[in-house]
């Protein structure tokens, strides 16, 4: 019901927009919706702010099939891109659990300043990664020099974005059961909440 399996990863091997979307809707989206309900309640309870889930629908796609899918959590009922937000999702290569801000947000500069104040907290995150582009699979380890560069880029570059979190390759222990995955995401979100 909640954790991703080989069947979910294989969705991204299906050729063609219509075929891949059919598989996503049947296989993976029900899990994203359940995770959305579970973790919007969890984040609301942990932060005292109301969080709403936003499951990717991929409605704007007309030709290319999606390379990833997700549920995002924000304090805005209508959307998440304009605000710092949490995400749970997957590419064909890994599951991701993230918190950060993307280039569409008018709050990037404020978020960058918050992250700068919490630099030591970020550097203490073991086994966490950072991403400069939420649309690509690539991520990097959190190291001081790269973190400083990414924070300055987030603050000063129009297309800059920055997210922190974890990634789980197929076969990772966190992906072996619903209980293991829910516990892992809870633990990860509790650390990411400190970056708000």
Image (cartoon, rainbow, N blue to C red):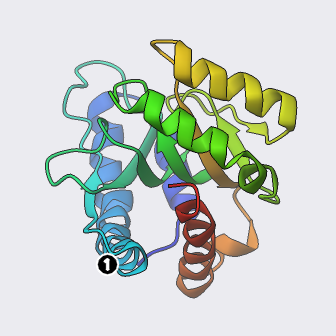
Element class at badge 1: helix
Count of marks overlaid on the render: 1
Left or right, residue 22 beside residue 139: left
Q: Is residue 117 above or below residue 154?
A: below
Q: Is residue 134 above or below residue 165?
A: above
Residue 179: % across, % down: 56, 87
Q: Which residue is mark 1?
A: 41
Q: Nearer the viewer, residue 61 or 159?
A: 159
Q: Residue at 19% of width from left, 33% of height from top?
A: 59
Residue 68: % across, % down: 46, 40
Query: Can see residue 60?
Result: yes
Residue 189: % across, % down: 55, 67
Quarter of the view holding residue 14: top left
Left or right, residue 100 beside residue 138: left
Instruction: In the displayed orientation, state which residue is furthest to the bottom.
Output: 179
Q: Quadrant of the N terminus?
A: bottom left
Residue 60: % across, % down: 20, 26
Query: Can see residue 13?
Result: no
Q: Residue at 68% of width from left, 73% of height from top?
A: 174
Quarter of the view holding residue 32: bottom left
Left or right, residue 134 beside residue 80: right
Q: Residue at 69% of width from left, 58% of height from top?
A: 170
Instruction: In the displayed orientation, state which residue is furthest to the left.
Output: 78
Q: Residue at 29% of width from left, 68% of height from top?
A: 49
Q: Is residue 104 above or below residue 21?
A: above
């Amino acid at each position: 019901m909640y954790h991703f399996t080989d069947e979910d990863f294989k969705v991204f091997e299906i050729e063609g927009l219509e075929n891949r979307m059919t598989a996503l809707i049947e296989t993976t989206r029900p899990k994203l919706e359940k995770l959305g309900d579970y973790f919007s309640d969890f984040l609301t309870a942990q932060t005292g702010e109301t969080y709403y889930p936003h499951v990717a629908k991929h409605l704007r796609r007309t030709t290319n099939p999606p390379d990833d899918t997700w549920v995002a959590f924000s304090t805005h009922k209508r959307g998440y891109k304009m605000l710092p937000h949490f995400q749970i999702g997957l590419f064909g290569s890994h599951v991701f659990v993230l918190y950060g801000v993307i280039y569409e947000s008018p709050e990037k500069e404020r978020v960058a300043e918050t992250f700068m104040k919490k630099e030591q907290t970020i550097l203490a995150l073991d086994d966490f990664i950072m991403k400069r582009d939420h649309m690509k699979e690539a991520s990097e380890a959190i190291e001081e020099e790269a973190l400083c560069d990414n924070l300055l880029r987030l603050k000063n570059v129009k297309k800059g974005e920055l997210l922190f979190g974890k990634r789980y390759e197929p076969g990772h222990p966190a992906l072996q059961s619903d209980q293991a995955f829910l516990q892992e995401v809870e633990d990860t979100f509790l650390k990411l909440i400190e970056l708000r």
